[in-house]
Amino acid sequence: MKIFLPKIFVIFLAWVIISCQKENVEYDLVIYGGTSAGVTAAVQAARLNKSVLIIEPGTEQQLGGLTTGGLGRTDFGNKRIIGGISLEFYKEINKYYLNDSNWTWQNRSEYFKNQTYHPGATNIEEESMWFFEPSAARSIFQHWIQKYNIPVLYGERIIREGEGKAIEKEGGWKVAVPGSVSDGVVKKDEKITEIVMESGTRIKARYFIDATYEGDLLAGAGVSFTVGREGFDIYEESLNGIRTKLSIPDSGMPAWRHHQFEPAVDPYVVQGNPDSGLLPMIKSNGPGTEGKSDHKIQAYCFRMCLTDVPENRISFEKPEGYNELDYELLLRNYEAGFSRLPWINSPMPNRKTDTNNQSAFSTDFIGANYDYPEASYAERKNIVDAHLQYQMGLMWTLANHPRIPDDIRTEMSRWGVTKDEFVEGNGWQDQLYIREARRMISDVVMTQHHCQGKVVENESIGMGAYGMDSHHTQRYVDENGYVKNEGDVQIGLRKPYPISYKSILPKETECANLLVPVCLSASHIAFGSIRMEPVFMVLGQSAAIAACMAIDKDCSLQEIPYAELKQKLQSAGQILNLEDIPQQK
């Protein structure tokens, strides 16, 4: 049975929150960001009988972040590192789909019979289920919010004027120095005492968690952070920085495996004529120096939920303002020999999908997101809208343009966004896939060396296991005069690795009562391994346990004895080290 918060309950929660502000109530814990990490943190705090508030700057649809925003194909590398509330979530997903009433467009046995193999795919005998519809995830998170009486404040955004900004240093590395506190954060003695919303609402708490994908609270609190990619000179990582060679397939490997163009795709508006100018989103001055830092961000997209059920399908429509030139590279790539559908179309229950980027020109809007991490709210909206426009136009082009091969157009025309998901957006979600934005810089920075087991942190609060992964960050013209993508990294790991408590903890001199489980302290390439939704849920829960310990001890988060924290984490079901990983059944 699907569970949704009644509107009257939402109104009541809003009334309670507003009343609390008038009465000058101080929460034990305020969580800024209703992502999956934010929800698990709130549930954990509520279970420990702490007063907790979630502030979700976006819409009610965005509670749960990407987990409810279309990312139903769970990535983790190793299922057995997922514990605690994160594992509970996937068990609840399984229970949801054991209910026959939740199978609308197909039955359970049909789904499992036809499921395409993927390392994260669910075996029918498992207690957990790892592929799911957005509405299934949303019903579970909303049920938890209601069960634990967790107030959620939607559409309230922190004032960001005066926040720290990343400044480009010599070598191209962009870093925000500490100390610049925004108008939306009040601090005393290195502790946040309250945060101020654009509406004027002031919210007090003893401890705070920044669970946003953007890191707006950490930036507002004057905490050090970085944006972009670190060069080899920063942490001596061989996979970080500008890496053109990693994006070029080995001999005999098809170009699309590295999301690369077919050979000899022309970059100019008029083919063969540089004077006609470059096609949209191609850099004019090359990719930059190999191994160096830059400010560029791996590409974003929407993780589409599609269906091939005619009764539930909304066909792809040409968006207003469509410009064919934006898709000329796609057309030329097909004409150069590319012959596949440019996506990963993973089957979810009820004849739906989680559709993600694949190949040189796909759902990733390469080069359109560089300003997003530090952009104003209005500028971010423009960037999100541009991504939506691009992706809607892409899907229409694939289904309708005469230069697309007939078999591709025929297959694409079978699909469309769904009528029963993201209803408010006519099948399109609010949540853009923010793969990476700001990343905190703290006493411990997780790097490639941690991911590969060359450096091991002793104060673990969870584990990572997914390969070091980055999507492309830029398009450029190579030495032969053809277009290339750069930024793709796909390097697997030998075994899981621990994630340090200090990586979600600012330096004590910068902030003593803030935890950052999403925009944590990690290099670009290490973040590419850590940034999976089940791991964010693990880190969110661990952050809440640490915050509750600090509340009980009335101490800074940096003063918590790790031995005691470790015991509490393990008691809560967290997997912290290799020896904790349960044996495969």
Image (cartoon, helix red, strand yellow):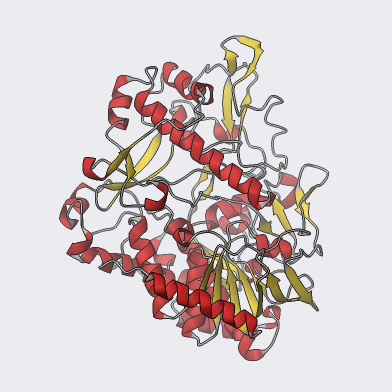
* Residue 404 occupies quadrant: top left
Q: Position of residue 387 (x, y in %)?
A: 53, 40
Which residue does the image show at 72% across and 66% down from the upper left?
Answer: 184
Q: Position of residue 138 (x, y in %)?
A: 38, 63
In this view, 109 is above or below 404: below
Q: Nearer the viewer, residue 451 or 181?
A: 181
* Residue 8 occupies quadrant: bottom left
**How many labels, in total?**
0
Which residue does the image show at 60% across and 43% down from the upper left?
Answer: 382
Give the farthest residue toward the top. Answer: 272
Q: Is residue 177 visible?
A: yes
Q: Position of residue 428 (x, y in %)?
A: 42, 46
Image position of 144 (left or right of 179):
left
Looking at the rendered image, the quarter that the C terminus falls into is bottom left
Image position of 520 (left or right of 581):
right
Looking at the rendered image, the quarter that the N terminus falls into is bottom left
Which residue does the image show at 57% across and 74% down from the upper left?
Answer: 543
Q: Position of residue 577 (x, y in %)?
A: 50, 71
Q: Nearer the viewer, residue 35 or 392?
A: 392
In this view, 104 is above or below 41: above
* Residue 564 occupies quadrant: bottom right
